[in-house]
Image (spheres, coloured by chain):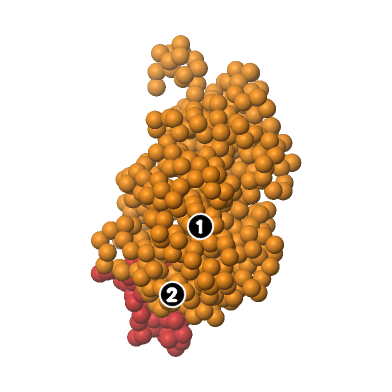
Chain colours: A red, B orange
Amino acid sequence: MPERTLAVASAHGLHARPAAHFVKAVNDSGCTVELQKGERTINAASILGVVSLGIEHGDEVTLRVQGATAEAVLQLLGAFLEKDHDA
Amino acid sequence: MNHIGTRDLTTQSNLIHGVGIGRATTVGLVLRMPEPIPDPANRPSELTPVAEASRAAGALSATAAQLRHRGAAAGGTAAEVLDALAMMAEDPALAADVRHRIEDGATAEYAIHAAMTTFREMLASMGGYLGERAGDLDDVALRAIAHLQGLPNPGVPESVTPFVLVARDLAPADTATLDLDLVLALVTTGGGPTSHTAILAREKGITAVVGATGAASLVDGDVVLVDAENGTVERNPAQERVDLALQRTATLEAIRAQSAGPGRLASGQAVPLLANIGSIDSAREAVARGAEGVGLFRTEVLFLGAEKAPSVHDQAAAYREVFAQFPDQKVVVRVLDAGADKPLAFLTDSSEENPALGRRGLRALAAHEHVLRDQLTALAIAAANSDALVQVMAPMVSTPSEARYFRDLAHEHGIAVAGVMVEVPSCAILADHVAPQVDFMSIGTNDLTQYTLAADRLLGTVASFQNPWHPAVLRLIEAVGRAGAEHDVPVGICGEAAADPLLAVVLVGLGATSLSMSPSAIADVRAELAQHTLDDARRLAALAVSAESAEAAHEAVLDASRNTPR
């Protein structure tokens, strides 16, 4: 399953609004997406799961995508996380 | 509470303190939020797990639909907040947790309550911003439980006459759907300055005092004076106090309403009000809010996350788009400010133990001079293709020789106006040597405060030191203002300090010739400046620099500005 590790760019990390946008993008993608920070891996379709990771600016996370369009979705979600949504 | 014992201290005991949002004052009758729906009891279900599970799923999806519906009706930020809540109601992790509890014999009500509580405690334990969001989950759970039990939704009380709403804290769904024509002011006993109540009150311009624990004793029908500027709620205020407060607000409103156009002191001197921006969106907002140009264009925001330096061509295109918003207006571009809280892979060394004191800002650019040269080239190209009056400045300059180095390099690349940010104390202390080396100086009050008080601005435990009213900071600003005046070099302010209307007046009194801030602060700062002459501003500045603490400086200026004849 394709995966990518990157540093989250938003100044306030992945909280509230950016987290909601991210989960919406995951749900719209039609793929199964996992997000891992440190030891914990969660279902990225769950906003509660995403915020529970407590992702801060600059934290390294790994995205894993499964599905027909996995590569494209991985690229899209990776780009989302690497953009500063609090700017 | 011992009400009898406090009767004598009438004026004291009637004054409740909290954190004010905005500057207005309102008087009105209290209406409290209804008591919340009681927590469901953990009793065994009398239905089959399949039946309970379908009740729970139905209630959660109805709640999501209801929240989306209210969001669509409210629009704007409210819609986003309510959409995020709807996503919580439909969350797959929550649904799984609810299902497990029902399979173990719980009712739908209890399963939803218990599952939400688990997630809420997890959020609350994270503290800070997320902790304050924890109340959102209770709101979702209560709506679902109200749906299951056929109860009316919890929320804002209904009234046909205007009232002051007193609540523990407002959930986003409540604040989003407040009828502004009826709500005179908001008072919460919980919630801090970053709670939903505060954020939405700020956005919608509602007078609010949050975190006023003493307001728990207010009852329906109490008359209260809500004073956001002072962060107080006064029960049964004397008529003259009401008159005075309302008059103050009316004066502010009137001045604000007629103070369109450029920033100006009461004595006539122009003080350009500029915007801090970091993207094309914020550039458009700045224009919409009446900014007279840009005092800080943070270019690194465009490149955060980039692995390698962006090409001259890409940079020029990005800059041109922003410049196009400001024909014939000043745009001060800060070259890449990498390091500390804003690392850029191609400029900063991530292994530094103390990056705020490391090779950041101009230090990093000087070490990778090709990156700086590329950026100046791109800026010169974009400037040549636009009608904006483009200037450049360097961040984190600590010596006069660094200032000279940057100005010479900028001039060499064809950018005629080049200055430095003053945010390191050494640069402020030697401002008389820096001024002759540059075309302008711009004071970054956030970092200047952090370095002057040796308190990491990102560290919550020392947040109380991060106060730009501190006289130590103001004295450094005074030194820069004096050097600017002596050498005829403009002195701008581009930190958060300029967004505080009263502090903005003090900064002008210390010698600031322009102020740059978040676009949303421009109207209030413009209104405040219009009330003070340059002599007033200098008098207030003298009071502030001679105080012994940030709090004392603020209080002295607040008192004196109230007594200034208008």
B240 left or right, relative to B506: right
B193 left or right, relative to B539: left
B22 left or right, relative to B307: right
Could you tell me which secondary element the residue under label 2 belongs to? helix
Residue under the image location 34 percent in, 66 percent down:
A59
A45 left or right, relative to B356: right
Q: Which mark is residue B123?
A: none
Report the amino acid beneath label 1: Val
Residue under the image location 60 percent in, 21 percent down:
B241
Using the image, determine if residue B351 lies above or below residue B429: below
Task: Give the camera-side residue of B31 and B339.
Answer: B339
Residue under the image location 58 percent in, 65 percent down:
B416
Report the amino acid beneath label 2: Val
Q: Which mark is residue B371?
A: 2
Q: How far from the left and from the top, in percent, is residue B104? A: 30, 61
Q: How far from the left and from the top, in percent, is residue B117? A: 36, 52
Task: Give the camera-side residue of B172 and B437.
Answer: B437
Q: Find the distance from the CA under tag 2 to the CA under tag 1.
A: 21 Å
Which of pointers 2 and 1 indicates the residue nearer the eye? 1
Residue under the image location 50 percent in, 53 percent down:
B436
Using the image, determine if residue B218 lies above or below residue B127: above
Q: Which residue lies most toward the right here? A: B258
Quadrant of the rendering where the N terminus of chain A is positioned: bottom left
Badge 1: residue crowd in 10 Å (few <14, some 14–19, many ≥20): many
Q: Quadrant of residue B355?
A: bottom left
Which residue position holds label 1?
A: B438
Q: Chain of mark 1?
A: B
Badge 2: residue crowd in 10 Å (few <14, some 14–19, many ≥20): many
